[in-house]
Image: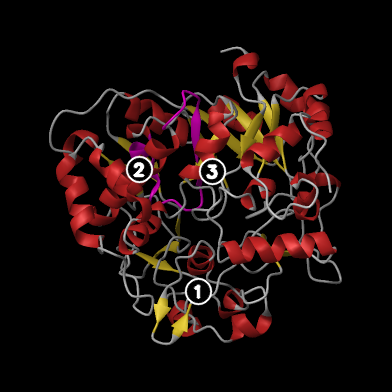
Amino acid sequence: MSFDELPAIIQGGLGVGVSNWRLARSVSSHGQLGVVSGTALDQVLVRRLQDGDPGGHMRLALDHFPFPEMARRVWETYYVAGGKDAKRAYAVAPLPTKDGPREFRELCVVANFAEVFLARQGHEHAVGVNFMEKLQTPHLPSIYGAMLGGVDFVLMGAGIPMKIPGVLDRFARNEAATYPLHVVGATPEDDTLMSFHPREFFDGPLPTLKRPRFLAIVSSSTLAATMAKKANGKVDGFIIEGPTAGGHNAPPRGQLQLTETGEPIYGDRDQVDLAKFRALGLPFWLAGGHDSSDALRDAREQGAQGIQVGTAFAFCEESAMREDCKRTVIDEVLAGTGKVFTDPVASPTGFPFKVASVGGTISEKEVYDSRPRVCDLGYLREAYRGADGRIGFRCASEPTHAYVAKGGDAVDSVDRKCICNALLAAIGQPQVRGSYVEPGIVTAGDGLATIGQFLAPGATAYSAADVLAYLLGETPGAV
């Protein structure tokens, strides 16, 4: 494939469900690469169904799922006609483990199929899906589900996805694939390989699948070179994501140092050598703060295929972020008071996590302090080897006594936030615990301060098409 056939703009995979099928479809329908977030899609699906499937979109997708009995099980288990009472708790999907349970894996397959299927409707352009490497337990069924939906690109960062290209190769042939689960304390004799066997998992003949292109999200040329040479399949390109991007950031290289306000300090060792990327001969995109037509032009002049943009799309009309959060953030940006804090301890993964200051969310200390520590979704849990040799799971955001009982260090639990529950709350799917309703969290990159440039004069909202037009230099934009 020539570079000219690749998109100039990739829409970032945002949060849990923020970059939903509507946003991805809008971006792709304009000829750029729309990307759905694959993070916790099983949970997003079951909560949409319990909300009564507004618009009937999940019903449409499930009606096209190639294995009707599996789709029927999901529908009958979770669909609530008219939607659940707002005061009632959501039924949650099963917690993920190394190779199951089966219901969890079915939900991963169906949910990823549905999101990609819907994103592909009404146009003939490419659609991508974004996954976090550190969130490993859903990888195999989620990727297979996205491929059933016809996904064109798989993007993955927040870790070292060396084994994903080989998974794509095997699934394209409907063969069984494995993926190594990182287990703290595991010995060479321990079985840490997760597996997914399409021919054993499904009843009936399997459809022909295409192999999606794989783009690794990296922060260094060293990692890119290693992946290009040693990955177990073809790497089709790289997204170079700097510490200004939203969500999880790569930790600074060397000893961690903090600013006076408590943010990680990035230095010369964290700068990317684009000459080394050009030498790899693979297409690459620049991400993090590249949100203008000038930035797109500069990226191309430096040899990049284009740019990946996340924050600008997170607050557009088509994103699934709660409207009150969008409105608050846009108002604060226009007033010059919008802030983003790179929190070194918020995420239980240990990666720095960017948090926008939004009232009523756990970015406020009093809101965080008032939340009972609960880990009932488990996506960011750490796998560890127990004394009996079995694989267990722990989370630095769960109750501290439970974390310590599983071998965790109490120090690592200080100020950790339950990002899983908070990100679902940020898209209007908050869990209800008696009279307590989970607060949200909003993540955004340093480019948050410039989102006003996508608003037309006098406007208070903007669309994905407005963002694309501005990035491509087709409108004057600006406030």
Q: Amino acid at mark 2?
A: Ala
Which numbered mark, 3 or 2, is in the foreground of this view? Answer: 3
Residue 217 place in picture, x, y as percent: 61, 39
Residue appearing at x 62%, y 77% in the figure: 360
Mark 1 or 2, nearer chain start: 2
- Residue 251 seen in the current view: yes
Residue 218 place in picture, x, y as percent: 64, 39
Color theme of the render: secondary structure
Q: Secondary structure at mark 1?
A: loop
Residue 129 place in picture, x, y as percent: 48, 39
Q: Secondary structure at mark 2?
A: helix
Would you name the residue on which mark 3 appears? 23
Q: Report if residue 112 lies within the magenta region.
A: no
Q: Report if residue 123 lies within the magenta region.
A: yes
Residue appearing at x 58%, y 25% in the figure: 31
Task: Please tell me whether residue 443 is drawn above or below residue 22 in the rendered image.
Answer: below
Q: Amino acid at mark 1?
A: Gly
Task: Please tell me whether residue 118 is drawn above or below residue 170 in the rendered image.
Answer: below
Contact between marks 3 and 1 (CB within 8 A): the answer is no
Tell which of 69 and 272 is nearer to you. Answer: 69
Would you name the residue on which mark 1 appears? 408
Which numbered mark, 3 or 1, is in the foreground of this view? Answer: 3
Tell me the crowding category of disc 2: few under 14, some 14 to 19, or many 20 or more residues within 10 angstroms, Cα based. Answer: many
Identify the magenta region: 121-146
Residue appearing at x 36%, y 33% in the figure: 147
Residue 414 is drawn in which quadrant?
Answer: bottom right
Tell which of 399 and 183 is nearer to you. Answer: 399
Contact between marks 1 and 2 (CB within 8 A): the answer is no
Would you name the residue on which mark 2 appears? 114
Tell me how far mark 1 sits from mark 2, CA to CA: 37 Å
- Residue 308 seen in the current view: no
Q: Amino acid at mark 3?
A: Leu
